Amino acid sequence: MKVAVFSTKPYDERFLSAANREAGHELVFLEMRLTESTAFAAEGAGAVCVFVNDDCGAGVLGRLAGEGVRLLALRSAGFNHVDLAAAKRLGLTVARVPEYSPRAVAEHTVAIVLALNRKIHRAYARVREGNFALEGLLGFDLCGRTVGVIGTGKIGLAFVRIMRGFDCKVLAHDPYPKAEAEALGARYVPFIDLLGASDIVSLHCPLTPETHHLIDAKAVDAMRDGAMLVNTSRGAVIDTRAVIRGLKSGKIGSLGLDVYEEEEGLFFENLSDKVITDDIFARLLTFPNVLITGHQAFFTVEALTAIAETTIGNISSFERTGAALHPVSVERLA
Ligand code: NAD
């Protein structure tokens, strides 16, 4: 099947080509992001393969369907960027990679927690400048601290397991509590109680209408003074403006982000010779107690291999049977 692969980076091409060796699909690698003005590039393709910052709104999906596309193969678990109702209306099948490496994201979250707590980002810069002073680098022992985990799905559970290894107390919140989390020693509590009792709050829920701006001004107020907030789920789970106010007042002691609500057009690109025009993002970069990575939590060899293999599996299955291995639709999540 001919597949137009949007937002292709060299590593996507490498891992997808390797996974496609036996399947033999005609993969057309395109560097551009999928938008209304680039959808024409899918002409003649039966499938389009996209990543998290591609535009999969109704307008774009309409154009893809008009070009004859029948399958939208996501290289991600999250599908909040896809208008599933429009896909259904247009007869487009949407497939995703439900699980690739929950450990990859959980381990990156731990890396952010450790770096923020022990100020590794500041220490690295200081030492390179010959500044060996310790003032400003004071951290705390993780052992015995309380970690609040919001969302105990695959990634949240992996994070709970690691933090229990640090001898942290773990509080959890999830509309669907998991026995596995409790077996690991996590205690489910209401959202507001978790915020009030946690030294570290880590977000692992999907972005849905219910979780949009879950961490708003009210939630920030409910947090412990000086708590650490970490988001490796989706940017818009946090109201960035409210969190900036929390950082300015000292209510939030430190902030770690791998995702940002307006990350499209910013993340995954080298903009080092450009002016950043997003004033909110630019403000975040000025805080010494904020650590941002550009949506790289998934970025391990194991995860990229699994993403490529599942994506090719989805495409092959759709070509053979008319159904993807891991379809996602308004009615049913695989
Ligand atoms: P999952 O579906 O296994 O788990 C999500 C959990 O969140 C579920 O247990 C669900 O019940 C819970 N949840 C839903 N609404 C909630 C709410 N209001 N409050 C608390 N919990 C709620 O998903 P996963 O594989 O663990 O991934 C979690 C999220 O991580 C994904 O949706 C995606 O947005 C994000 N993610 C980020 C990266 C990255 O590179 N930064 C990579 C993969 C996934």
Image: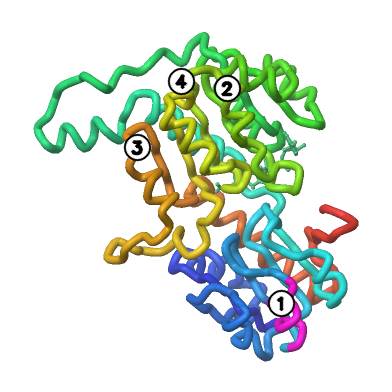
The kind of residue on which mark 3 rests is Phe
- Residue at 71% of width from left, 83% of height from top? 63
The 10 Å Cα crowd at callout 4, few under 14, some 14 to 19, many 20 or more, is: some
The 10 Å Cα crowd at callout 3, few under 14, some 14 to 19, many 20 or more, is: some
- Identify the residue under disc 2: 223
The kind of residue on which mark 1 rests is Gly
Task: State the separation of the CA atoms marked 3 and 2.
Answer: 19 Å
Element class at badge 2: loop
Where is residue 254 drawn, in percent x and y? 43, 29
Q: Is residue 306 magenta?
A: no
Q: Is residue 151 visible?
A: yes
Give the number of the disc on residue 59: 1
Where is residue 225 drawn, in percent x and y? 49, 18
Where is residue 238 drawn, in percent x and y? 59, 41
Give the number of the disc on residue 287: 3
Task: State the separation of the CA atoms marked 1 and 4.
Answer: 44 Å
Mark 2 close to ligand 1, CB under 8 Å: no
Residue contact between numbered discs 1 and 2, judged by CB atoms under 8 Å: no
Question: Which quadrant of the frame does ligand 1 lie within?
Answer: top right
- Identify the residue under disc 4: 226
Mark closer to the chain start, 3 or 1: 1
- Residue at 59% of width from left, 72% of height from top? 21
Q: Which residues are magenta?
A: 58-66
Mark closer to the chain start, 3 or 4: 4
Task: State the separation of the CA atoms marked 3 and 4.
Answer: 14 Å
The kind of residue on which mark 4 rests is Gly
The 10 Å Cα crowd at callout 1, few under 14, some 14 to 19, many 20 or more, is: some
